[in-house]
Amino acid sequence: VYKIDSNAFCACTKLEKVKISKNVVSVGTNAFENTPWLTKQTGDFVIIGKALYKYKGKSVNIKIPDGVISIGAFAFKNCCQIKSVIIPDSVKSIDLEAFSGCTSLALTGELPSGLTSIGNDAFYCCRNGAVTGELPSGLTAICSYAFNGCTNLALTGSLPSGLTSIGGCTFRGCTSLA
């Protein structure tokens, strides 16, 4: 198994144990919500295979573990306490609303060099969001509203030559973008 789709085990109220392949690279929205298995997960990060599914911590400065390939939908949504996050170069995708509503978030440094896609609303309303430097050269898609409302977004250089899609309202309200 490489992918677990949205709501796959959602509300399975007796699901306490799951043996998951280390090859999983994508976990859909709410795949394990409302399960005893998710409730029992300890530590700051719930990582399924190589996919960061959910952040359960309280830290203000975060370093996502090396080896994570994808940051799942809603993984950090509305974690307003987060001030900085370091995303490793292993990350290839940042999914739907992964950091949406993290109003204090400022990314430390550049986006990961291996990043190929940024999902809808991924950084929506990260008002203090300051992604510095250039977008990664392998980036092929930035979905709708990805950086909408990121008033401190500071990017330099050109858009990557392989970028094939920029969704609607992607940079809407990014008043610092020059």
Image: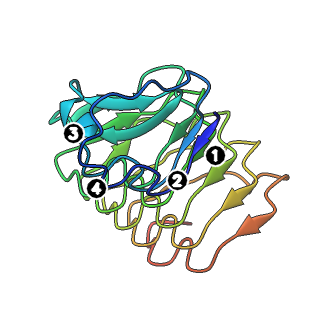
The picture places residue 79, in percent across and down from the top left corner, at 22, 51
SS at badge 4 = loop
Q: Which mark is residue 134?
A: 1
Q: Is residue 67 left or right of residue 125?
A: right
The residue pinned by badge 3 equals: 36
The answer to which of marks 4 and 3 sits earlier in the sequence is 3
Type of amino acid at the residue the image marks with label 1: Glu
Kindly identify the residue that appears in the image at 24 percent across and 29 percent down: 41
The quarter holding residue 19 reads top left
Task: From the image, state whether disc 2 or disc 3 is nearer to you.
Answer: 3
The answer to which of marks 1 and 2 sits earlier in the sequence is 2
Kindly identify the residue that appears in the image at 44 percent across and 77 percent down: 173
The picture places residue 168, in percent across and down from the top left corner, at 61, 80
Kindly identify the residue that appears in the image at 62 percent across and 25 percent down: 23
Task: From the image, state whether disc 4 or disc 3 is nearer to you.
Answer: 3
Q: Is residue 61 left or right of residue 155?
A: left
The residue pinned by badge 4 equals: 102
The answer to which of marks 1 and 4 sits earlier in the sequence is 4
Task: From the image, state whether disc 2 or disc 4 is nearer to you.
Answer: 2
Type of amino acid at the residue the image marks with label 3: Pro
The picture places residue 10, in percent across and down from the top left corner, at 36, 54
Q: Label 3 neighbourhood size at 10 Å, few (<14), some (14-19), many (20+)?
A: some
Q: CA distance from mark 2 to mark 4?
A: 15 Å
Report if the CB atoms under discs 4 and 3 are less than 8 Å apart. no
Q: Label 4 neighbourhood size at 10 Å, few (<14), some (14-19), many (20+)?
A: many
Frontmost residue, 175 versus 127: 127
The answer to which of marks 2 and 4 sits earlier in the sequence is 2
Report if the CB atoms under discs 1 and 2 are less than 8 Å apart. no
